[in-house]
Image (cartoon, coloured by chain):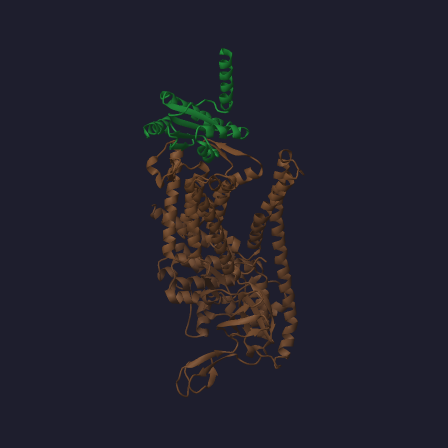
């Protein structure tokens, strides 16, 4: 029985973890505010500059805010779409995959409260996140 | 066929206006579709042709395209132009603020205006909203150019045209990148998947803005009828058609695995470049050969004319419609009496005479429809005519029928054709054809839709220094070309200077009537004519050497130009008497009063005019080029002094 449970857990883990091989972070995002960071592996300077800032802002509210990174690299399109769809932000991915970095801030009901194109200061991300948290 | 004459300018202008309408419509329809896609959240419309366009960029481009359309449809409405200027300025300000926001890495929510309610996904469509850097730059450059263009200021022309050229170059980058298979561009503000449709929209919109005022700035070169204008037009057209075609062929070859894009890409780039350069070179060669053919054709016609002159004189008693009768006369509206066209009232009943011209409306030689009578001189009558095959408006100059028996006048007519055939310059009339029309020698010339300088001086009493310099510099340009081709005009006077107003925003000055022109080379035939005709000219503008029958050279025209400048500024020629003899006497012996004693002008300009009016040719500027340079320097110094006086 224990073996069966363990096996089931492993299978579940593998099934859920596969898509996140594309994304850097897993998002158990239900009922939480969601921050989506769309990036591209080629976007080394700007995306690598934005990523730690967004992560830092999100980490302050880690309990109530989920964080998701989606890669727009062509080789990962299918997985990225699946990931975005799973998190209810496929439209956002489709709309913004042509220019990165983009950071979207979603309410727990997955309404887009704010999205920011290009690099912004930490204060801007912080304000956008707080606005998403206050949104009903 | 690419039009080659100045008369084709209006048609070319219309073509450009049509281009602006088509280009504006295309961008408008595309952006409208994308905007509808954003409102209705339809992914296929938001990413039409597979390329994303941000909502703010689509709205801005739609507004700009709409402005271009309206400006092209109502080019003469000042209110439309003002509205266009205001709206494009607003869009430019939006672009500038977004650019500042992007550079600051800020999010200025106060500058985003909602254009929709909350959509299903929670998004409120904002303007300008989140726009990608390429979109911001496109919006800023195109709207600024459009704003400056609507100002209709010749000083701003180089600025907006430079901006548009830069915009085109920036927009070409993604297009070239896409053609070369580059997936995305990365920069300080992030990475953008090659935004081809937005870039093409920017290019098309830039072209549309150019096309709204093609006659201004350096773009006016495209409208010039000379070799350069023709070559530029053809090159641009060929590049616009052939390069995309080349790309399609390349894409087909890649798809059919004829070539491998990855390995062949550098070679294909070089091939693209070579194709472009070859196109441009071939067009210049074509234009040059066409120009040469035209010249040879004209020379051949002139040679034929020479042999026909004698024949024409011999046969002028024949059955021709034109020979031997004056087609223009006056008819009394009461008694029907026919008199000379110059008679205003009937001598019998004092009723006003009505002028009738039998040629008006007639088609001569099966191809020239006489539109209207333009005027007559002692030697010729000029009609506005339409070449019914080529649909071009031209000026048809016919020798006065009563002069047909006088070989001297026929030869002078012929000399005018020969002189003009040598020259091709925007400030000189072009002769398109010459020959005999029903027994009468004719010249087919550029039709200039403008007014004579004499009329302008009469209307304004005198011209300002700036106006005078602007006009005289253009005359000098034309005469430099004439002198370079060995032709001296010998009859420069206000009545022989036409100022065209058909090119919007710019005065185009043309030197006309080379009926007294003299060829400078050592041709016995021409010498003879020169000796016979050296007393000809307009006494008030004749140089001392012309009065006494000495040979004329370039400095003769410089003297006449001095008289013309004098008259422009004071309203009167420098020396004139009650009779021709008195005028000759004054020209030979009197020194004219300096202009500054009559009106206030810069001392150096006064000196230059007096130098042109020197009795001895060797005391005048040595050449028209030297004169032009001196006048230009004066103009620049005056502009500098004005700037210094009004630094703001």
Which residue is found at the position 44% from the left and 33% from the top?
A92
Q: Is residue B606 above or below residue B326?
A: above
**Can the viewer see residue B531?**
no
Of B347 and B534, which appears nearest the observer? B347
Residue B403 rendering spot, x and y as whole percentages: 56, 77
Q: Where B360 sits versus B612, above or below? A: below
Quarter of the image where the C terminus of chain A is located = top left
Q: Colour of chain A?
A: green
Residue located farthest toward the right when viewing the structure as drawn:
B258
Tell me residue B574's x, y (percent). Answer: 42, 65
Counting from the top left corner in percent of width and height, residue B115 is at 36, 42
Residue B190 seen from this side:
yes
Outermost front residue: A1
Residue B44 image position (x, y, % from top left):
49, 40
Image-quadrant location for residue A68: top left
Instruction: Please tell me which residue lies in front, B107 or B629.
Output: B107
Front-most of residues B565 and A12: A12
* Residue at the image position 39 percent from the left and 43 percent from the top: B92
How many marks the image carries: the answer is 0
What is the drawing colour of chain B? brown
Q: Nearer the viewer, residue A39 or B76?
A: A39
């Amino acid at each position: 029985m224990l073996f069966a449970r363990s096996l089931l857990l492993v299978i579940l883990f593998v099934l859920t973890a596969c898509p996140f091989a594309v994304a850097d972070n897993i998002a158990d995002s239900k009922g939480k505010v969601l921050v989506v960071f769309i990036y591209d592996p080629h976007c080394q300077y700007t995306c690598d500059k934005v990523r730690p800032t967004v992560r830092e802002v999100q980490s302050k509210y880690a309990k109530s805010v989920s964080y998701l990174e989606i890669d727009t690299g062509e080789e990962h399109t299918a997985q990225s779409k699946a990931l975005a769809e799973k998190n209810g932000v496929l439209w956002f991915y489709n709309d913004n995959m042509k220019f990165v970095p983009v950071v979207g801030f979603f309410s727990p009901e997955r309404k887009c409260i704010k999205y920011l194109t290009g690099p912004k200061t930490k204060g801007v991300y912080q304000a956008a996140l707080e606005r998403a948290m206050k949104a009903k | 066929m690419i039009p080659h004459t100045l008369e084709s300018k209006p048609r070319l202008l219309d073509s450009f206006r049509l281009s602006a309408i088509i280009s504006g419509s295309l961008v408008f329809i595309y952006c409208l579709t994308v905007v509808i896609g954003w409102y209705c959240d339809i992914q296929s419309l938001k990413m039409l042709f597979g390329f994303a366009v941000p909502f703010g960029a689509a709205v801005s481009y739609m507004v700009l395209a709409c402005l271009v359309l309206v400006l092209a449809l109502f080019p003469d409405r000042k209110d439309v132009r003002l509205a266009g200027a205001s709206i494009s300025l607003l869009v430019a300000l939006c672009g500038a603020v977004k650019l500042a926001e992007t550079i600051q890495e800020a999010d200025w929510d106060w500058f985003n205006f909602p254009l929709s309610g909350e959509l299903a996904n929670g998004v409120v469509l904002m303007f300008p909203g989140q726009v990608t850097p390429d979109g911001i730059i496109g919006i800023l450059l195109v709207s600024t150019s459009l704003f400056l263009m609507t100002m209709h200021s010749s000083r701003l022309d180089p600025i907006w045209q430079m901006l548009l050229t830069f915009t085109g170059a920036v927009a070409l980058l993604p297009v070239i990148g896409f053609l070369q298979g580059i997936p995305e561009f990365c920069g300080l503000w992030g990475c953008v998947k090659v935004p081809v449709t937005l870039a093409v929209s920017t290019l098309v919109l830039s072209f549309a803005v150019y096309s709204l005022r093609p006659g201004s700035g350096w773009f006016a070169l495209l409208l010039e009828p000379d070799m350069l204008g023709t070559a530029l037009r053809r090159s641009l057209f060929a590049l616009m058609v052939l390069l995309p075609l080349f790309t399609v062929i390349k894409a087909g070859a890649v798809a059919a695995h004829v070539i491998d894009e990855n390995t062949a890409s550098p070679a294909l780039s070089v091939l693209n470049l070579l194709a472009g350069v070859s196109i441009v070179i071939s067009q210049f060669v074509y234009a040059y050969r066409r120009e040469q053919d035209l010249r040879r054709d004209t020379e051949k016609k002139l040679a034929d004319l020479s042999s026909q002159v004698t024949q024409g004189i011999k046969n002028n008693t024949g059955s021709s419609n034109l020979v031997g009768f004056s087609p223009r006369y006056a008819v009394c509206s009461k008694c029907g009496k026919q008199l000379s066209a110059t008679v205003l009232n009937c001598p019998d009943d004092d009723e006003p005479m009505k002028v009738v011209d039998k040629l008006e409306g007639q088609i001569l030689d099966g191809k020239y429809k006489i539109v209207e009578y333009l005027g007559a001189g002692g030697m010729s009558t000029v009609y506005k005519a339409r070449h019914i095959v080529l649909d071009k408006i031209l000026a048809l100059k016919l020798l006065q029928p009563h002069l047909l028996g006088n070989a001297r006048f026929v030869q002078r007519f012929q000399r005018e054709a020969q002189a003009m055939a040598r020259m091709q310059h925007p400030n000189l009339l072009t002769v398109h054809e010459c020959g005999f029309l029903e027994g009468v020698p004719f010249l087919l010339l550029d039709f200039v839709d403008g007014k004579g300088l004499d009329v302008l001086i009469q209307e304004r009493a005198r011209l300002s220094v700036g106006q005078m310099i602007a006009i005289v510099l253009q005359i000098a340009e034309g005469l430099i070309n004439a002198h370079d081709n060995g032709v001296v005009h010998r009859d420069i006077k206000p009545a022989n200077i036409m100022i065209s107003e058909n090119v919007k925003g710019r005065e185009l000055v043309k030197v006309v009537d080379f009926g007294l022109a003299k060829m400078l080379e050592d041709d016995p035939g021409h010498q003879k004519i020169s000796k016979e005709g050296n007393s000809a000219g307009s006494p008030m503008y004749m140089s001392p050497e012309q009065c006494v029958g000495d040979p004329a050279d370039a400095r003769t025209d410089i003297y006449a130009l001095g008289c013309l400048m004098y008259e422009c500024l004071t309203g009167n020629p420098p020396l004139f008497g009650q009779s021709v003899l008195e005028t000759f006497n004054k020209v030979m012996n009197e020194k004219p009063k300096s202009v500054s004693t009559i009106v206030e002008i810069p001392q150096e300009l006064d000196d230059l005019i007096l130098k042109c009016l020197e009795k001895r040719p060797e005391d005048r500027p040595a050449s028209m080029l030297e004169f032009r340079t001196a006048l230009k320097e004066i103009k620049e110094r005056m502009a500098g002094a004005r700037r210094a006086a009004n630094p703001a």
